[in-house]
Amino acid sequence: MRDELLPGQLLARGVCRHLASHGFAVVEEFVPERGKRVDVMALGPKGEIWVVECKSCRADFMGDGKWQGYLDWCDRFFWAVDTDFPTDLLPDETGLIIADAYDAEILRMAPEDKLPAARRTAMVRRFAFHAARRLQSARDPDAMIGLV
């Protein structure tokens, strides 16, 4: 039996579906560097890198003091929330996505702050490595124990 997904994971699923429909490759719970874990990292068709943090409630957002540390790892940063979330809490200088478990819509495009070329190259490699390991883990979980 499948584990029940948490509210933030349901938002991430809808975000991933939406971004995938626009040609993005997506990975949930991506670690750009030790000590950081973003909810959704998306690699676009032109090599753009987006980070989306999914917040299921006010308390979830208020308890997140580390989000600004994610800005160094993407070209655009978004919040994904549901229709009941008080969006006035979210910083205006970030993107806004309204999502549910099945889809999403970008309401406010995040401003672009392009990554330096060396960091972009490193992130694309890390993204590819992470995605390949996840796929292998799904195909052969016993072989990947302790590696993902």
Image: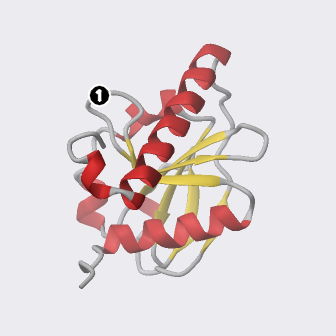
Q: Residue at x 64, y 17 (%)?
A: 116
Q: Residue at x 50, y 44 (%)?
A: 132
Mark 1 surroundings within 10 Å by alpha-carbon count, few (fewer than 14), some (14 through 19), many (20 or more) = few
Query: In the visual, does 57 lie left or right of 45?
Result: left
Query: Looking at the image, which is closer to me, 43 or 50?
Result: 43
- Residue 101 lies, with reference to residue 18, above or below; the image says below
| Residue 12 percent location from the top left of the image | 45, 65
The quarter of the picture where residue 57 lies is bottom left
For the residue labelled by badge 1, is the local secondary structure a helix, a strand or a loop? loop
Q: Can the viewer see residue 146 in this picture?
A: yes
- Residue 112 lies, with reference to residue 121, above or below; the image says below
Q: Can the viewer see residue 39 in this picture?
A: no
Q: Residue at x 23, y 63 (%)?
A: 59
Query: Looking at the image, which is closer to me, 8 or 112?
Result: 8
Give amino acid for label 1.
Arg
Query: Looking at the image, which is closer to me, 123 or 148?
Result: 148
Query: In the visual, does 80 lie left or right of 109?
Result: left
The quarter of the picture where residue 2 lies is bottom left
| Location of the C terminus (image quadrant) | top left
Query: In the visual, does 141 lie left or right of 21?
Result: left
Residue furthest toward the right?
A: 46
Pointer 1: what residue? 34
| Residue 122 percent location from the top left of the image | 55, 22
| Location of the N terminus (image quadrant) | bottom left
